[in-house]
Structure formats: structure tokens, C-alpha cells
Amino acid sequence: MQNAPRATHTGTWEIDSEKNIKVECYVMDNGERVLSLRGAARTMGLSGGGSQALTRNLNTQWISPYLSDSLKDWLALANRNELPQYFTKRGTPFLPFEASLFVDLCKGYVDAMHDNALKTEGQILTAERLYAVMTAFAKTGLVSVIDEVTGYQEERDRDELQKILAKYISEELLPWTKRFPDEFYKQMFRLKGWEYKGKPKPPYAGKLTNEYIYDYLPDGVLDELKQKTPKNKSGNKTHRYHQYLTEETGLPNLDRQLQQTIALMKAADTWEEFDKLFKKSMGEPIKKFESKK
């Protein structure tokens, strides 16, 4: 398989040394950020069966409702033994597991945990490990973590911001659809002690939405959205920010940030408690680029 992707950078991200939670990461020569299937299973604490441990776990009936469509498609390929073979820098073959799929896997287990769907001690331990992983990469995203631990970030192209914006920002305005669940604002109002009446919402709610949601998309995205969404003469925005996010990358990452934030809101009794939980989980937004003029 001469054309099979080969790793250009590799590294191990150690999250919790006491619990031996670590992630083996690879950047491939085709630009993909992946884990090895065997390594992903080890990160979850699964034992036995090597690279098959993960597929065996995902084939169990209880987890199925929490798997994303992408994970289900991947699982179908795995069950048919049709997964591609990649190679390490040294030429050792391995089965890859894409970073985006691992993010979906973490979210699936955490959602199941919130729904009290975990029944065995093993399921609970796996969910706790994946929650620790998800909390660790929530600040910058798993792709950024992989780039850092493998050393690839030092070699990224100088036009990184433009590449990020191309992935996140759509050139065409998408039709409006409801993107922010009512639960997000209900929890915000509950924690702030405000009376929730649906629409309209105070301008301060929009400020908080930027601070806790849009600011945690990659740096530079919110600035670009602001430029694309000017205010009219009445001082109102002409469109919603999310109408300019791409369907492939921007919107899924927005949805992921929303779900993680709502989960933290539900766990808090006051806004101060939520803010503390949020900052502990997410950290501060990473600012690498100056605002576009």
C-alpha cells in the first residue's frame, strides 16, 4: 500500500498520570489528525482484543443511541473489516481513528452519563475517563492538542488563520434555522435569576452568548462573523452569526460547545458556580491572531 497515509509527526498527550490516561496522536502526510485504534481503546481503559476492543465496545446495544452518524458509519466499516491501514513514521502499520470521531465518542459517553444510562462499573469508569479527556481538550479542540503534542504546530503554514476561517466561515449566508436550544437560555436565566419569557432577550444575553459560546470557537472566527454581520440603522444585527458558519465544520463545533456549556449549566446552582465550573473545564479562549482590520 504505497499510497497509504504515513505519519509525519507523532506524540503522546498525557492527561492523568495517576489514572494512566493518555492519548497517542499522529499527524499524517495527508493532513489528517488521528489516533491509533488500539491507542484509543487504551485511552478508554478497555482491555483485551487489541484494536478490536473499541469496535466490540461500540457494538453493544446500550451505547447505540448515543453514537453520532459518523461513528455509526465508521463502525459499519469496522464490522466489515474495511478500515484503511495507515503507517507510523517508522513504517509500522496501524488502524486509524480520526480525531473528530474520538470527540464524538467522548460526547456519546458523557451524554449517556448525564442520562444515567450507565449500568456497570466498567461503563462508568470508561465514561469518567472520557469526560476527563473531553474536559482537557474542550479549551482548544482535539486537533489543536494533537498539533501541540506532536510538534506539528511549529510547522503549520503562515496562513493558518485563513485556513481556519475557510473551514468555519461560509461565503454564502445559510437560511435561518433554530440553532440555540431553549434550554441554553432557560439555564442562563435560571442561573442569573431572571424571568424567562422566551423572546425577546436582553442584549446582555447576547454578550454572554458571545463570551461562553462564540469566543470558544477558534480564535478569529468571532471577529470574522462580526464583520460579516453588521448592524442596521436600528442597531440590530442583519443576520445571526451562525448563518455564516459552515455546515461541515462551523456548525458542528458550535453545537458541541453549546451542549458542553448546557451540561455545565445544569450542574450549577448559581451563575458564579457555573462560571467557575466553565472556566475550570474550558479555560480561557486562546488568542493567537489579532483582529482583522
Image: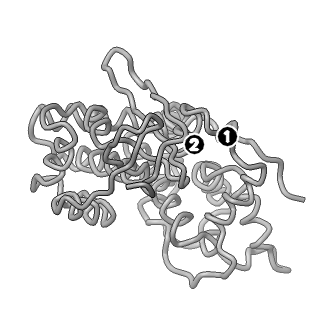
Do labels 2 and 1 touch, CB within 8 Å? yes
- Residue type beneath disc 2: Ser
Specify which label sits upstream in the sequence, 2 or 1. 2
Residue 225 placement (x, y as % from top left): 72, 66
- Residue type beneath disc 1: Ile
Q: Which residue is drawn at 10% across and 52% down?
A: 60
Q: Residue at x 44, y 34 (%)?
A: 90
Q: Which residue is drawn at 27% across and 66% down?
A: 73
- 249 shown above or below 159: below
Q: Residues within 10 Å of mark 2 (few under 14, many from 20)?
A: some
Which residue occupies the extreme right position in the image? Answer: 293
- 42 shown above or below 64: above
Residue 66 placement (x, y as % from top left): 24, 57
Of 140 and 243, nearer the camera is 140
Left or right: residue 215 versus residue 24 is right
Which residue occupies the extreme bottom position in the image? Answer: 175
Mark 2 vs mark 1: give the one in front: 2
Helix, strand, or loop for circle 1?
loop
Q: Is residue 268 visible?
A: no
- 269 shown above or below 254: above
Left or right: residue 95 versus residue 48 is right
Residue 27 placement (x, y as % from top left): 52, 44
Which color mode does the image show?
Answer: one colour
> Which numbered circle lies on residue 286?
1
Q: Which residue corresponds to mark 2?
A: 144
Left or right: residue 227 versus residue 286 is right
